[in-house]
Amino acid sequence: MDNEKKKILIVEDEKNIAQMLAFNLSQAGYGFDIAYDGEEGLKKALEQDFDLILLDIMLPKLDGFEVCRRIRVKKSTPIIIVTAREEEIDKILGLDLGADDYVTKPFSIKVLLARVKSNIRRASNELVNADAAPGDDQEVIRIRELVIDCERYQVTNRGEQIILTKKEYELLLHLARNKGKVFSREQLLEEVWGYEGFYGDQNTVDVTISRLRSKLEIDSSRPEYLFTKRSMGYYLK
């Protein structure tokens, strides 16, 4: 991946943090632009083409959740939420609105850069194409009443279309292509998110699984499709 061709939008109202991020991204070979409030960030995100957006939550004029929601209506640019807030509801809301990942302050620059790289690679299909078998994008996967149409990126269950975020779809597809196989959180971070080792936050997997289960199952406490194998991981049955 040639980082010099990749441009990142930093939406962060704390100028010292924004400048620190910009410096480290520049050192890693990325181009960047900065917006210091939500309205400016949304305007730049919609009017320009970026390879990834680093989005703070606590922003003046327009908060990060609303910025994320409005971006997702128009674009599929990868979004990493950067926030000091660690409440579980914030993580769930951010991912449900279409964010691809989140990091909490304070964070390691090394970890952040690794996750930036992974999300850009995933979005540009560098990882997907390497893993996919010929004809995978044309297949239709059926598991009882669950139907995944890979050509149309469409999921239906019991005849009704299920609206999934990009990451929820990728996770479901990966589990569906490996029905019955149990994946640990570490494996899913590597194989779906493209992270290696400690660069990924295992809570990201749990939150995404929780959201996916709530959309697929009639009763999340008594799943029909998405199961947890205690102390081992997740699988699709």
Image: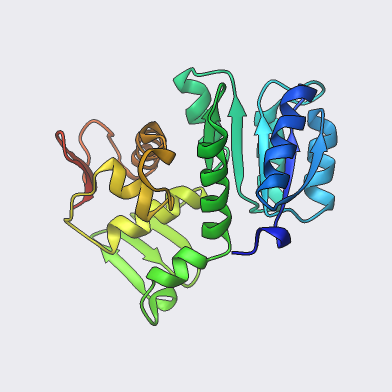
Q: Give coordinates of residue 37: x percent, y percent.
A: 81, 28
Q: Give the answer, above or below, for where 169 lies relative to 213.
A: below
Residue 159 in view? no
Which residue of the protein is positioned furthest toward the front in this rendering? 27
Q: Give the answer, above or below, for where 17 lies relative to 11.
A: above
Q: Is residue 158 left or right of residue 88?
A: left
Q: Nearer the viewer, residue 84 or 59?
A: 84
Q: Is residue 89 left or right of residue 173?
A: right
Q: Give coordinates of residue 126: x percent, y percent.
A: 51, 67
Which residue of the protein is positioned furthest toward the bottom in this rendering? 134
Q: Residue at 42% x, 71% y: name it.
A: 130
Q: Residue at 59% x, 39% y: name it.
A: 80
| Colour scheme in use | rainbow
Q: Nearer the viewer, residue 169 or 23?
A: 23
Q: Give coordinates of residue 25: x percent, y percent.
A: 68, 44
Tell me how many marks there are: 0
| Residue 71: quadrant of the picture | top right
Q: Is residue 72 left or right of residue 177?
A: right
Q: Give coordinates of residue 144: x percent, y percent.
A: 23, 60
Q: Residue at 34% x, 45% y: name it.
A: 216
Q: Quadrant of the N terminus?
A: bottom right
Residue 90 in view? yes
